[in-house]
Image (cartoon, rainbow, N blue to C red):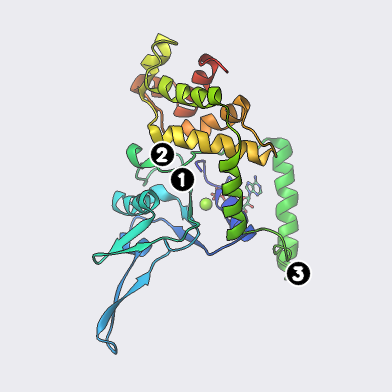
């Protein structure tokens, strides 16, 4: 999740964590963070005369990597490697991460001072890159009311908890995942997804101007992510089949960090999300 400070990025992930009955950990990324602060480390146990592995915050089901671009590359790659491989190696031994493992990361826009941009190749490991914008007047008023309500609760010592029986546990998430995979996806729709990704690599057959705006297209991870997210979007709408609209709804967020604009296009305000939107206008809908 990317957006300017104060747009409730942290608040949003914490709200998700409150409703997910699984181990949650927030890590504030700072310039002095070390890879071992994430993975954990071998601790010497003098009584037993041996080292014992002390698992780090990575071994939680939901992890908030807050302000991920404030930590240097070594720490970022320790996290991104774990996300790619679902395991962590410390002191020559490999440890599996939990079956339910979700990393949410926030970052301030990269122009901000004192930040380290995440390497493009590694960004690919995130399923989506969501941008958070400023709220409008009506929304600002609702935020005021909401925050006032929270402050009253806090003062009264009745901080809003998730009511008994609400929220999701690990089993329910796994069940939902299985259902998402079982949704029907027609053959032409699968070809549509592939064609969008191929067009991101070579848009020449569609539009020469657009082709010149793209320096780098999406990888097969992008194809897989687009298919998964379109399915999830259909599932959330309560349907048993996936439509082109599902693909179109998720494509900008799925492709934003996977399509790299050329230097000139970037200077003209094009980002991967906008390029993806343009591709959706060009690729024929089945
Ligand atoms: N859309 C919103 N809905 C609810 N609260 C909001 C919203 N935008 C901002 N806030 C409030 O603004 C404050 C800043 O939010 P925070 O999550 O710390 O921002 P960020 O992590 O993006 O810097 C919080 O107290 C939050 O409740
Ligand atoms: Mg924050």
The yes-or-no answer for disc 1 within 8 Å of ligand 2 is: no
Q: Are marks 1 and 2 in contact (CB under 8 Å)?
A: yes
Quadrant (top left, top right, bottom left, bottom right) of the C terminus: top right
Instruction: For mark 2, give the secondary structure.
Output: loop
Q: Residue 72, position in %: x, y?
A: 32, 51
Above or below for 270 versus 28? above
Label 3, label 2: how far apart the Cα atoms are: 40 Å
Give the residue number, with chain letter if any, for mark 2: 110
Picture quadrant where residue 262 is located: top left
Please state which of residues 85 and 112 is positioned toward the viewer in this rendering: 85
Q: Residue 29, position in %: x, y?
A: 41, 55
Q: Residue at x 47, y 37 (%)?
A: 225
Give the residue number, with chain letter if any, for mark 3: 156
Q: Are marks 3 and 1 in contact (CB under 8 Å)?
A: no
Instruction: For mark 3, give the secondary structure.
Output: loop
Above or below for 42 versus 147? below
Picture quadrant where residue 161 is located: bottom right
Label 1, label 2: how far apart the Cα atoms are: 8 Å
Please state which of residues 226 and 125 is positioned toward the viewer in this rendering: 226
Above or below for 156 versus 68? below
Q: Earlier in the sequence, mark 3 or mark 2?
A: 2
Q: Residue at x 52, y 30 (%)?
A: 252
Label 3, label 1: how far apart the Cα atoms are: 33 Å
Give the residue number, with chain letter if any, for mark 1: 107
Instruction: For mark 1, give the secondary structure.
Output: loop
Q: Residue 134, position in %: x, y?
A: 60, 37
């Amino acid at each position: 999740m990317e957006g300017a400070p104060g747009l409730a990025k942290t608040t949003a992930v914490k709200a998700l964590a409150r409703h997910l009955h699984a181990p949650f950990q927030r890590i504030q990324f700072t310039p002095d963070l070390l890879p071992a602060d994430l993975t954990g480390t071998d601790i010497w146990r003098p009584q037993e005369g041996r080292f014992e592995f002390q698992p780090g915050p990575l071994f939680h089901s939901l992890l908030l990597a807050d302000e991920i671009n404030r930590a240097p590359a070594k720490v970022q790659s320790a996290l991104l490697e774990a996300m790619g491989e679902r395991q962590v190696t410390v002191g020559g031994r490999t440890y599996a991460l939990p079956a339910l493992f979700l990393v949410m990361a926030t970052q301030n826009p990269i122009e901000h001072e004192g930040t380290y941009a995440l390497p493009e190749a590694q960004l690919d490991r995130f399923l989506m890159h969501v941008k958070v914008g400023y709220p409008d007047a009506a929304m600002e008023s609702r935020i005021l009311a909401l925050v006032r309500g929270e402050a009253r609760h806090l003062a009264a010592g009745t901080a809003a908890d998730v009511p008994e029986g609400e929220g999701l546990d690990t089993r329910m998430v796994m069940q939902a995942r299985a259902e998402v995979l079982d949704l029907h996806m027609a053959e032409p729709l699968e070809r549509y997804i592939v064609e969008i990704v191929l067009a991101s690599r070579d848009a020449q057959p569609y539009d020469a101007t657009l082709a010149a705006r793209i320096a780098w297209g999406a990888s097969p991870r992008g194809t897989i992510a687009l298919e998964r997210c379109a399915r999830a979007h259909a599932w959330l709408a309560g349907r048993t089949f996936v439509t082109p609209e599902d693909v179109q709804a998720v494509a900008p967020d799925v492709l934003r960090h996977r399509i790299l604009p050329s230097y000139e296009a970037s200077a003209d305000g094009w980002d991967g999300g906008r390029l993806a939107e343009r591709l959706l206008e060009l690729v024929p809908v089945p």
